[in-house]
Amino acid sequence: MPSNALINRTSFSAADIINDIWTSLRLPPHALSSITLPDSQPGPATPSSFKIGHLAQSSIALSALAASLVHSQRSPSSSSSSSSTSSSSPSTTIPRVTVPLHHALLEFQSERLYTIDSLPPSPSWGSIGGLHATSDSSHVRIHDVFPHHALGTLSLLSLPPTATRQDVAERVSHWKAIDLETAATERGKLAIYALRSYAEWDAHPQAAATPSHPIVLRPLAPSPPKPLPPINPPDSPTKCLLQGLRVLELSRVIAAPVAGRSLAAHGADVLWLTSPSLPSIPALDKDLSRGKRTIQLDFVSSASDRQTLLELLRTCDVLIQSYRPGSLAAHGLSPEDVQRINPHIIYANLSAFGPDGPWARRRGFDSLVQTCSGMNVSEAEHFGEGEPARALPCQALDHAAGYLLATGVLAALHRRATQGGSWVVDVSLAGVGKYLRSLGQYPDRTGFKGVPGVTAQGGVPGELLETRETAFGRMVALRHSASVEGCEVGWGEMPKPLGSDEARWL
C-alpha cells in the first residue's frame, strides 16, 4: 500500500535491488541466478550523495533479465503448451545477462554522450528555466524545454515573449513558492514546482500516495493465456530475445522513450507515434529513437488517423504512453477502452506522480520531481557549499523509470503467457525517487570526493561506443550496456526525421 513511511534499504547492493523488485513482481526466483554484475561496488560511482550507480546497474539488469525470462518461455526447447499454461520452471534455460556498472552509469547519460558528424547534441533547455528565488525565502524550479511551457510561464508572470531570465527572476521574487506552483500546475497547465525539503515533502499527501515499490502491476480484464509467437526461424544461430513483440509507443522527453528503446534493443518491433501538432526535442529524439520506426498520426483531429491508430492498437502486444493520467482517456483511449478492442493488451503508463493522490493528473519532469520531493535540498546539504538546491548529475529518475517500465511490461507479458489476461503497468518518477531515497545516501560529502564524472563523449571508453549511419549523419553513440549470452542486443533502426515510416507492423 502507498505510504509516506520509507522502507529502509540502506544496506542494499545492486543485486539486492534486483532481488527486491523481481520478488515484488512475483517473477520466478530461479531466474535471478542468470545475472552477472561486473564492477559492482558499495561506494559512490558518480558524483552524488545518492546511490545512482546501484540504481543504474540494477534497473538496466532488471529489464534485460525480464526480456531473457520472456524469451525462455518461447524458446524452441519449450513447448507452446507448457509456455502458455505454466510459469517458467527451474529447468528452463534463461540466457545469462551481464551489465557492467560503469557502462550502465554512462547509459544513464546517453542523451548527452552521442555525436553526429563529430558534433555533440545541442542543449535542450530554454533561456528562462531553472531555479528562481521567491518572496518567502524559498525557490521554484521552472521547466522550459517545451516552447508552450516557456511562453505560458511568461504569460502567467505578465511578461512578453521577449522577456529575459532576469525579467523572470524579478517577477518570481514577488511570489510565494507554493502560490506560484499552484497557479502554474493547477490553473496554468505549466511545469513549475516549489523547492521542498524531505520534511515538507513527507508531510504532503502526494508523498503518502506514492508506492514503496516503483513498478505497480494490476490485472485489467481476464482473457486466455497468450504467449509470444515462437522464434522464427527456430534454428537461427543468433536470436533477439523479443523478436515478434509489437510495441506502440506514445511518448515524449526521456523516461518512456527509454522504455521503448530498451525493448527495441532486445528485438521488439517498436513503433514510436508522435503528433504532428506537438513540439519535439530533436536533441533528445536522436538518441532515444534508436531501434524504433517513427510514425506521426493526428488521431485527435483526423478520423482516418484515428482508425489507423485503433488498428495498430488492435494488433499490438504493448502500448507505452507517457501523457498525463486521464489525457488519453479523454480521447476514448483509456485502458478499458483499449482492452475492448485488444483483450490481451499490456497498457503501460509512465507519469510524474502516478495514478493516485492529489497530484495524479499533474504534469512533471525529472528535474521537477527532484525539486518538489526534497532530493535537491538533500543533495545540496550533502555537498555542503550552502546552495539552496543541487540537481543530480544525470536524469537518473527518467532513465531508471524507463528501464523499470520496460521491466514491468515484460513482467506483464510473463503473466499474460502463464495466467492470461490484459494488464496495466504504472511507473512514476516520484515512485522511482522514493525508491532511490530508500537506498540511503553517502554521508556528508563522501559521495562527491574523488568520484569522477563523465560529461562528454571524450570521457567514454571507445569499446563502449558504436558508429552508425543515420538520416542526420554519422552517429557515434553508446552501445546498450546489457549483454545476453547467445543473443543479439542492439538497435537496427537508426534516427531519422519523425514520421518517416509506415504505420504498420513488420
Image (tube, grey):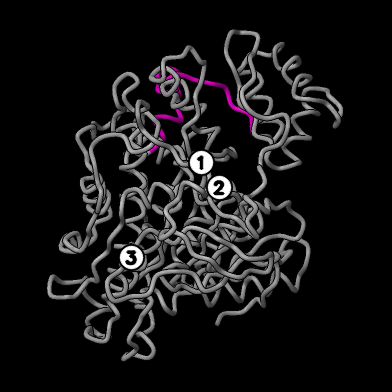
Callouts 3 and 2 close, C-beta under 8 Å: no
467 lies left or right of 43? right
Is 154 drawn above or below residue 216 in the view shown? above
Q: Secondary structure at mark 2?
A: loop
Q: Secondary structure at mark 3?
A: strand
Count of numbered labels shown in the rendering: 3
**Residue 200 location in percent, x, y?**
45, 18
Return the residue nearer the eye: 290 or 375. Answer: 290
Return the residue nearer the eye: 490 or 140. Answer: 490
| Pointer 3 or 2: first along the chain | 2
Dot 1 amino acid type: Thr
Return the residue nearer the eye: 12 or 318. Answer: 12
Span of residues in magenta: 191-210
Is 460 drawn above or below residue 417 in the view shown? above
Residue on which the image places disc 3: 483
Going 36% across and 64% down the picture, which residue do you hit? Answer: 410
Residue on which the image places disc 1: 455
Callouts 2 and 1 close, C-beta under 8 Å: yes
| Pointer 3 or 1: first along the chain | 1
Dot 3 amino acid type: Ser
> In 3D space, how far apart are the residues under numbered discs 3 and 2 (Cα atoms)?
22 Å
Residue 435 seen in the current view: no
Dot 3: within a 10 Å radius of its alpha carbon, few (fewer than 14), some, or many (20 or more) residues? many
Going 44% across and 61% down the picture, which residue do you hit? Answer: 479
Residue on which the image places disc 2: 112
Residue 353 seen in the current view: yes
> In 3D space, how far apart are the residues under numbered discs 2 and 1 (Cα atoms)?
7 Å
**Residue 167 location in percent, x, y?**
79, 19
